[in-house]
Image (tube, grey):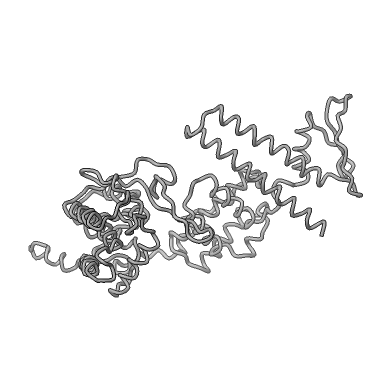
């Protein structure tokens, strides 16, 4: 029992040391971004290093003992001007300072990281990503899901130091043949490999990163690369019209008491293609004279239930505000926003948020998504997700209007590549329009 308690204490100390290492990297990043000045950064780093030295000494003292459990002496040798101690194999080890000698003992006993399996390093890398990159908790959840899907338990238990580029390529080939993932899923798998092995390289666990030798082109041949048909990805203009008509009809139902705010959010979404989190975080101050300033989002993390919070950056800005984007206010959008404001004023609802409940609190992303999904299912649609509407706006409206891809990407808040590859589909039921054009008729 004593041994088990000691091991738990060692693991806890290692964990604290790992957290301190992450804090150092975070301070460096904050300094680079101008969040803190060099004086404060130096002071913070010194405080962390003091804690590190104390913890390392504790760890070394716990394991650098004789057979009967007595601490091994660390003493200064005047004749050599060095600190010295004797290792379990009777060899002597020296250091110019006691701190340097402690570092050598720390490495000698392998105290830095206890679990060097692929799964163990993944957990460490994921913890660092969560702490230092200001990522959405849902991103961390997806990373874990991707790891669990593609890394089988036997491979995850392997010592990462023993994984050669040949073995990693062989495993990847076997995985592709077994699962036949779509291209995006395969790239997510590669992203997890990069996360794991880059971390292992950075912390000296491995000396060579095998991931660059896993070339996408080789394995994508075995992936499912058939592009989904439009009817399985987007909605037709007629289906979109049915959604707006149904929302308007439900606004008159008694159960909403004249305030179907989720319905209003859906109507603005149809016009702008804003992401769910962006809709929920939209404030009246973001509504300008000629455009909606989309620069923030509502995020959620699970800890004793769902917790929602506001961040001043959008998904494509990845944790650091770059000013957001602007969506022009059309006549339809202006009328809709005026209607929402008029309804709220008539009901005595006051809030900084455009979409709020009767008490003025912002609506939650889950409530909105659940409402949209239920609405689409009630109409018998195959697709019920938010992305389908964003892709529909791009394919049904932006492309037919001749809006350049650079502007389409800017309006929806993603890259040109993403717009062309994942958001551009032939319109549903477009064959009739093509036929009419070929017949010289106006569409």
- Identify the residue shown where x is 55% and y is 47%: 131
Q: Toward the viewer: 65 or 298?
A: 298
Please tell me which residue lies in front, 342 or 101: 342
Residue 326, image x, y percentages: 28, 45
Q: Tell me the quarter of the picture where residue 397 sits.
A: bottom left
Outermost right residue: 68
Q: Quadrant of the C terminus?
A: bottom left
Q: Is residue 339 left or right of residue 201?
A: left
Q: Residue at x 78, y 56 (%)?
A: 5
Where is residue 319? Give x, y as percent: 44, 45
Q: Is residue 107 left or right of residue 330?
A: right
In this view, 238 is above or below 62:
below
Count of numbered marks: 0
Q: Is residue 53 visible?
A: yes
Residue 180 on image: x %, y %: 48, 67
Residue 183 placement, left or right of 399: right
- Looking at the rendering, which quadrant does residue 55 occupy? top right
Q: Nearer the viewer, residue 320 or 193?
A: 320
The correct choice, above or below, for 75 with respect to 403 in the image is above
In the rendered image, residue 364, in percent from the top left (x then y), is placed at: 39, 59
Horizontal side, residue 67 vs residue 359: left or right: right
Q: Residue at x 64, y 55 (%)?
A: 120
């Amino acid at each position: 029992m004593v041994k088990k308690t000691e091991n738990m204490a060692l693991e806890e100390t290692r964990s604290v040391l790992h957290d301190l290492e992450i804090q150092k990297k975070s301070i460096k990043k904050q300094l680079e971004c101008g969040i803190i000045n060099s004086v404060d950064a130096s002071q913070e780093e010194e405080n962390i290093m003091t804690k590190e030295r104390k913890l390392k000494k504790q760890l070394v003292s716990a394991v650098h003992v004789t057979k009967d459990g007595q601490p091994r002496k660390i003493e200064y040798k005047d004749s050599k001007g060095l600190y010295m101690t004797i290792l379990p194999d009777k060899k002597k080890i020296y250091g110019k300072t006691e701190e340097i000698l402690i570092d050598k003992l720390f490495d000698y006993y392998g105290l830095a990281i206890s679990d060097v399996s692929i799964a163990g390093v993944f957990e460490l890398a994921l913890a660092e990503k969560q702490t230092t990159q200001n990522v959405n908790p849902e991103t961390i959840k997806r990373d874990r899901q991707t790891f669990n899907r593609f890394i089988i338990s036997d491979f995850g238990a392997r010592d990462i130091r023993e994984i050669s580029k040949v073995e990693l390529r062989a495993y990847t080939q076997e995985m592709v043949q077994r699962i036949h993932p779509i291209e995006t899923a395969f790239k997510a798998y590669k992203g997890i490999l990069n996360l794991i092995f880059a971390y292992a390289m950075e912390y000296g666990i491995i000396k060579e990163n095998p991931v660059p030798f896993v070339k996408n082109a080789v394995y994508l041949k075995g992936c499912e690369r058939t592009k989904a048909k439009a009817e399985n990805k987007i909605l037709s203009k007629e289906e979109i019209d049915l959604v707006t008509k149904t929302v308007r009809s439900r606004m008159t139902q008694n159960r909403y008491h004249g305030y179907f705010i989720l319905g209003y959010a859906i109507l603005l979404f149809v016009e702008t293609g804003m992401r769910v989190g962006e809709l929920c975080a939209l404030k009246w101050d973001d509504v300008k004279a000629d455009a909606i300033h989309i620069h923030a989002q509502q995020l959620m993390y699970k800890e004793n239930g769902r917790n929602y919070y506001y961040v001043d950056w959008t998904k494509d800005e990845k944790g650091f505000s770059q000013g957001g984007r602007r969506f022009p206010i059309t006549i339809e959008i202006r009328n809709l926003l005026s209607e929402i404001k008029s309804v709220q004023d008539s009901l005595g609802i006051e809030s900084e948020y455009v979409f709020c409940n009767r008490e003025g609190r912002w609506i939650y992303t889950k409530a909105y998504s659940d409402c949209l999904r239920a609405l689409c299912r009630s109409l018998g649609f195959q697709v019920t997700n938010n992305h389908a509407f964003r892709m529909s706006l791009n394919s049904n409206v932006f492309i037919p209007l001749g809006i350049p891809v650079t502007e389409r990407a800017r309006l929806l808040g993603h890259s040109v590549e993403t717009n062309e590859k994942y958001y551009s589909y032939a319109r549903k039921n477009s064959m009739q329009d093509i036929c009419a054009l070929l017949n010289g008729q106006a569409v």
